[in-house]
Image: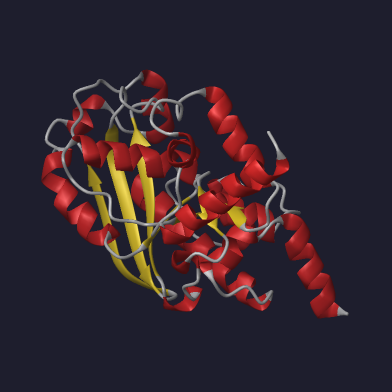
């Protein structure tokens, strides 16, 4: 493809993402650039990724979506944002097959925890033995639990106006979004942060970045690993410490956090110490 055509595609993608109010999937950008007949073709999405990865105007977000680096939704000051930290315990990992059996939510405004919410959810799918061993939740525990339809309004209320946060956002965000939409409830979060990615960027020398090991390294309480409420509270603690560490590196916006990697964090620390 001629160089001027590649530049035109990049410019069109940049204008599209600047106007978007949230990060956008590769497939949606391909649809915008190549039309509905070609956007699902693997080569179209490969072209989009190669175009955006080599252009500094674009940023890959924690949810593996794309944003314009200076898009308005990434310019909010981290200290002024609301965050909703979510952890899900599910019957398995396959979206569309497995179901949420427990959800934990911690909402922070600035650095302060303002609400905590935890509930089990009744499922139509049985809990596999390995999941019961991991979480301690069995089918009998869910017999009298409410269904997602009953709890979704409260969950959506907590999500409203907040940055979605999870320790591995690539699992929790799409699983919860799909589950809510399947039950005709909105998913109001515009963007998200991953405490797993933040911890790897800010503290690359820690022996492990799993939530349980991270809590030990950072001195955070985490009494019941693999239970949604306790995991959400531990991840909220990681987020609070990550925000403080990022401020120490001069990173103050959501976009700054998305750009962090272990190399930039180490470099900023060395500059501050010299």
Q: Answer with the quarter of the image where residue 22 lies.
A: bottom left
Residue 61 in the figure: left or right of residue 160: right
Residue 203 in the figure: left or right of residue 194: right
Q: Answer with the quarter of the image where residue 123 lies.
A: top left
User: Could you say which is closer to the camera, residue 209 or residue 6?
Assistant: 6
Say which residue appears at 70% left-offset and 37% top-offset: 2
x and y, in percent, of residue 127 in the image: 30, 23
x and y, in percent, of residue 83 in the image: 39, 64
Q: Is residue 186 visible?
A: yes
Classify the position of the N terminus by image quarter. Answer: top right
x and y, in percent, of residue 125 in the image: 24, 21
Q: For the view shown, which residue lies furthest in the right direction?
A: 274
User: Could you say which is closer to the camera, residue 5 or residue 44?
Assistant: 5
User: Could you say which is closer to the camera, residue 54 or residue 215?
Assistant: 54
Say which residue appears at 30% left-offset and 45% top-offset: 103
x and y, in percent, of residue 41 in the image: 50, 23
Report the colour scheme.
Answer: secondary structure
Location of residue 78 with respect to 87 vertically, above or below? below
Q: Is residue 227 visible?
A: no
Residue 263 in the figure: left or right of residue 256: right
Say which residue appears at 22% left-offset and 54% top-offset: 156
Classify the position of the C terminus by image quarter. Answer: bottom right
How many numbered callouts? Answer: 0
Say which residue appears at 50% left-offset and 39% top-offset: 26
Location of residue 110 with respect to 117 vertically, above or below? below
Residue 83 in the figure: left or right of residue 205: left
Location of residue 93 with respect to 170 vertically, above or below? above
């Amino acid at each position: 493809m001629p160089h001027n055509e590649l530049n035109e595609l990049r410019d069109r993608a940049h204008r599209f993402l600047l106007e978007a109010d949230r990060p956008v999937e590769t497939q949606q950008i391909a649809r915008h650039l190549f039309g509905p007949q070609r956007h699902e073709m693997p080569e179209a999405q490969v072209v989009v990724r190669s175009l955006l990865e080599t252009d500094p105007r674009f940023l890959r977000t924690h949810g593996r979506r794309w944003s314009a680096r200076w898009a308005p939704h990434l310019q909010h000051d981290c200290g002024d944002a609301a965050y909703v930290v979510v952890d899900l315990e599910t019957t398995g990992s396959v979206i569309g097959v497995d179901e949420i059996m427990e959800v934990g939510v911690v909402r922070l405004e600035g650095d302060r925890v303002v609400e905590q919410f935890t509930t089990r959810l009744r499922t139509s799918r049985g809990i596999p033995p390995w999941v019961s061993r991991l979480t301690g939740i069995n089918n009998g525990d869910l017999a009298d639990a409410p269904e997602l339809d009953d709890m979704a309004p409260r969950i959506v209320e907590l999500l409203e106006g907040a940055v979605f946060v999870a320790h591995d956002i690539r699992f929790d965000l799409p699983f919860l979004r799909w589950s809510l939409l399947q039950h005709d409830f909105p998913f109001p979060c515009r963007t998200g942060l991953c405490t797993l990615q933040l911890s790897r960027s800010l503290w690359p020398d820690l022996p492990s970045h799993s939530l349980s090991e991270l809590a030990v390294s950072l001195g955070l309480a985490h009494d019941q690993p693999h239970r949604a409420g306790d995991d959400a509270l531990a991840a909220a603690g990681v987020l609070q410490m990550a925000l403080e560490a990022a401020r120490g590196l001069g990173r103050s916006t959501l976009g700054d956090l998305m750009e962090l990697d272990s190399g930039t964090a180490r470099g900023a620390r060395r500059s501050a110490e010299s």
